[in-house]
Image (cartoon, rainbow, N blue to C red):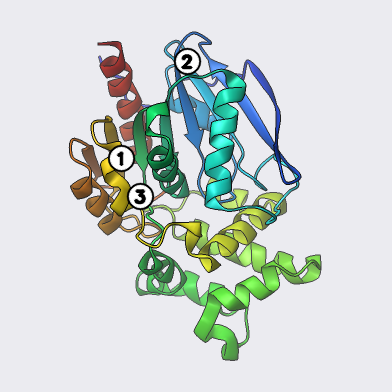
Amino acid sequence: MARDDLFPEIPFRRSGFLDVGDGHRLYWEESGNPAGTPVVFLHGGPGSGTSPAQRRFFDPHAWRIVLFDQRGAGRSTPHASLRANTTPHLVDDIERLREHLGVERWMVFGGSWGSTLALAYGQAHPGRCLGFMLRGIFLGRPSEVDWFLSGVRALYPDAWRRFAELVPEAERGDLLSAYCARLFDPRPEVHMPAARAWARYEAACSALVPDPRQLAEMENDHHSLALSRIEAHYFANRLFLPPAGLLAGMHRLAGLPAIIVQGRYDVICPMTSADALARAWSGAEFVVVPDAGHAAMEPGIRRALVRATERMKTQLAA
């Protein structure tokens, strides 16, 4: 019988910090089977960091599970740092981690911003990828950033109003600039109210049915500052992606297996991006969850992701 929900909780086997230069040290951990198929988990945000629950998408008897916190996120140091923090830096970091762990090729798993980074990494290093499992697709296009900052109010006017009203009315015509001015300010009394407001806005719109646990997580100042500051930094710089965008490089991933999981009612990363990616990626399996939004731990999304890891496990073993 096919598995239909998360695997039991497991501890990590080993962990450490990897110096990647520019003053950054990345936290990483391994769990599961040391002789299993390697899979690297790319978290969202950018800036959200990893959590123990994310190990549970994978059969620990079959997968060598690698989680790490990207620059400035989670347990990586320095916390919430924007110095030398760009998409090309993160792509290089993934390669440094792969070499550090002695992995020849690995499966790439990413959701939301993690899907963006997975595609950027895969297009730069297709020979190091066994395949892809992606969720809540974000392609980093200007229209997607504009949607997050303003379009969301069509469905969540109350959440957007709380987000916008943090800044004076005169600045609400350019919310990104207004938030950047506050989030990049070194004074906690300036950046923390903006960080909390940004994180609460994102959490309020992430799930089809709001999860009190996720909303409570956003009350953590350590998490909310990294998430909001790094996201704003990336949004203000067009995600540090090539001008032609990620869809233009999809030919580099031709022939690699892929499963795309998308919530039908994803408001953070609307389904139009997942649909565009699926149409550009010949052979990719496109799974639409009919009763879910954006959050990975929504029941329908997490079931679809576990099924995806199980199908990939079987496919790679064949």
Q: Secondary structure at mark 3?
A: loop
Q: Nearer the viewer, residue 54 or 123?
A: 123
Q: Amino acid at mark 2?
A: Pro
Q: Give how far across and how far down residue 144 sits, in percent.
A: 38, 64
* Residue shown at 51% from the left, 56% from the top: 203
Q: Residue 273 sits in which quadrant? A: bottom left
| Residue 52 located left or right of residue 248 | right
* Residue shown at 28% from the left, 55% from the top: 271
Q: Amino acid at mark 3?
A: Ile
Q: Secondary structure at mark 1?
A: helix
In this rendering, which labeled residue sits more in front, label 3 or label 2? 3
Give the residue pinned by disc 1. 252
Give the residue pinned by disc 2. 60
Q: Secondary structure at mark 2?
A: loop
Q: Give how far across and how far down residue 146 sits, in percent.
A: 41, 71
Up the image or down, 301 lies above or below 202; here it is: above
Which quarter of the rendered picture does the C terminus lie within? top left
Q: Are marks 3 and 2 in contact (CB under 8 Å)?
A: no
Marks 3 and 2, Cα distance to the nearest angstrom? 26 Å
Label 2 Cα neighbours within 10 Å, binned few <14 / some 14-19 / many ≥20: some
Label 3 Cα neighbours within 10 Å, binned few <14 / some 14-19 / many ≥20: many
